[in-house]
């Protein structure tokens, strides 16, 4: 079946479906190879194209059911298997790591019965499960073409956030994947600045990659409880986007893999980090940082030599960033009159958004630097928000932290105090 779309008509259809109560699919049971039964919510039975939507790890979402129902109305059968429940796992993203790719491969076999074409879709950390399942299935059926590709929603295919300033490693499955990929990438996402690296890593194995950017929305925009009006509107367009992605994947061929050396080596996962500053392990010489602040002044890290500088990369749409900002302000006040400064680097948001956020949500008076194109974020190898670095009075990087912190806590205050030059 060739999926074609008349956008205006489908938009009205999606809008109608989203304006009604949640449409539930029919529940079927699929028996896996080890005789485990998986409950699958199926929408639009009888189509010759199946979208196998893997769980996010965050529980069943009503808005996902609406998207599935609207997608089925476009002539695409949708399967939503509850793999976590089948394996007696809690609804957590970390539970996804305990699901075998064999389970996904078994589901692909079931969905493709009769020669139907199957496409996988998964979000965030579930993307690794989708690619692993596809790899297992291809090893079983090396000559079959019924698996048409994967649609990855804001994929997180990294082995956790690295130490500040270090490059993140991809999950090993990225270097094993040979599958057409369609990425749906929200604009307000930390992963958008690593999209080129992901595309290159996938292309090195012969996987063709198409990308659809979704402007002004955050990750998980289609089921966020705090979704904006714009995010709700984009969620209503997701069924048509699925149809477009499938049509694109159908016309895509897997290429020849590049040399193995181009893939790079994968390092072991990093050990969990504490919520305190940790010694910086990379090159101690900081990357350049020269940006215009919100008040119009040019701020250059080099001008702060002789002071301790806390550089904090943040965004207004990042809840951990918002939560830690009051403690940053208290820290600034605690070290008032000392050789200490905070530079808060905003990730590629427009000035009006940042000003409104500072007026309505938090009250801080340290400099806000505007990284309008994300160039500073790339130079500083920021993979998650918030990420912070401490530059000592000698101009070298001394410590860093990925994630939020209580910045005026005693351990952090003591660590910073040891770096601040004593007043003469």
Image: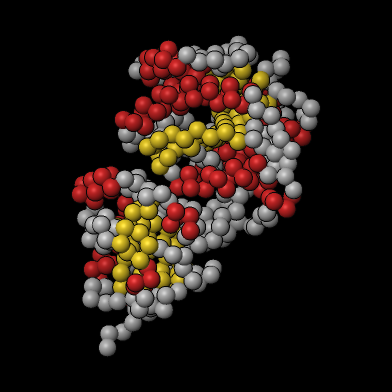
Tell me the quadrant of the picture where the C terminus can be found.
bottom left
Q: Is residue 46 visible?
A: yes
**Relative image position of residue 309 (x, y in whole percent):** 36, 70
Relative side of 274 to 116, left or right: left
Relative side of 273 to 100, left or right: left
Quarter assignment of residue 343:
bottom left
**Relative image position of residue 399 (x, y in whole percent):** 45, 69
Relative side of 84 to 307, left or right: right
Task: From the viewer's side, name the closer residue of 123 and 2.
Answer: 2
Residue, x 44% and y 65% (percent of image)? 288
Q: How many marks?
A: 0
Placement of 277 over or under 57, stated as above or below: below
Quarter assignment of residue 393:
bottom left
Tell me the quadrant of the picture where the N terminus can be found.
top right
Which residue reaches farthest right?
Answer: 143
**Relative image position of residue 340 (x, y in whole percent):** 31, 73
Quarter assignment of residue 80:
top right
Placement of 8 over or under 351, stated as above or below: above
Residue, x 79% and y 27% (percent of image)? 143
Which residue reaches farthest bottom?
Answer: 424
Placement of 265 over or under 256, stated as above or below: below
Residue, x 54% and y 68% (percent of image)? 282
**Relative image position of residue 40 (x, y in whole percent):** 57, 23
Q: Please say which color scheme the image uses.
A: secondary structure
Q: Is residue 39 visible?
A: no
Placement of 91 over or under 64, stated as above or below: below
Task: From the viewer's side, name the closer residue of 325 and 88.
Answer: 325
Residue, x 64% and y 24% (percent of image)? 251
């Amino acid at each position: 079946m060739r999926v074609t779309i008349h956008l205006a008509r489908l938009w009205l259809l999606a809008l109608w479906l989203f304006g009604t109560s949640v449409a539930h699919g029919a529940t079927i049971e699929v028996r896996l190879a080890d005789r485990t039964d998986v409950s699958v919510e199926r929408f639009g039975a009888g189509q010759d194209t199946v979208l196998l939507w893997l769980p996010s790890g965050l529980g069943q979402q009503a808005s996902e059911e609406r998207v599935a129902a609207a997608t089925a109305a476009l002539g695409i059968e949708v399967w939503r298997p509850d793999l976590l429940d089948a394996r007696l796992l809690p609804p957590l993203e970390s539970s996804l790591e305990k699901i075998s790719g064999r389970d996904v491969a078994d589901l692909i076999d079931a969905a493709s019965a009769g020669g139907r074409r199957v496409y996988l879709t998964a979000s965030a950390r579930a993307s690794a499960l989708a690619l692993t399942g596809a790899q297992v299935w291809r090893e079983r059926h090396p000559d079959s073409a019924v698996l048409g590709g994967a649609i990855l929603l804001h994929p997180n295919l990294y082995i956790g956030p690295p130490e500040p300033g270090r490059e993140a490693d991809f999950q090993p499955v990225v270097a094993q994947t040979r599958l057409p990929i369609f990425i749906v990438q929200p604009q307000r996402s930390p992963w958008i600045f690593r999209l080129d690296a992901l595309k290159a890593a996938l292309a090195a194995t012969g996987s063709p990659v198409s990308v659809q950017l979704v402007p002004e929305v955050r990750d998980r925009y289609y089921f966020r409880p705090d979704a904006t009006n714009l995010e709700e509107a984009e969620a209503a367009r997701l069924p048509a986007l699925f149809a477009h992605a499938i049509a694109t994947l159908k016309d895509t061929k897997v290429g020849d893999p590049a040399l193995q050396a181009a893939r790079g080596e994968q390092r072991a996962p990093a050990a969990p980090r504490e919520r305190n500053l940790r010694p910086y392990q990379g090159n101690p010489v900081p990357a350049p940082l020269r940006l215009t602040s919100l008040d119009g002044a040019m701020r250059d890290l080099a001008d702060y030599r002789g002071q301790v500088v806390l550089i904090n990369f943040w965004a207004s749409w990042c809840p951990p960033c918002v939560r830690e900002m009051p403690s940053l302000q208290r820290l600034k006040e605690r070290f008032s009159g000392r050789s200490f400064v905070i530079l808060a680097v905003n990730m590629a948001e427009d000035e009006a958004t940042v000003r409104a956020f500072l007026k309505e949500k938090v009250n801080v008076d340290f400099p806000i630097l505007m990284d309008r194109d994300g160039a500073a974020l790339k130079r500083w190898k920021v993979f998650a928000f918030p990420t912070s670095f401490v530059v000592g009075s000698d101009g070298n990087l001394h410590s860093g932290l990925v994630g939020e912190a209580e910045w005026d806590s005693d351990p952090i205050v003591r660590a910073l105090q040891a770096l601040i030059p004593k007043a003469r």
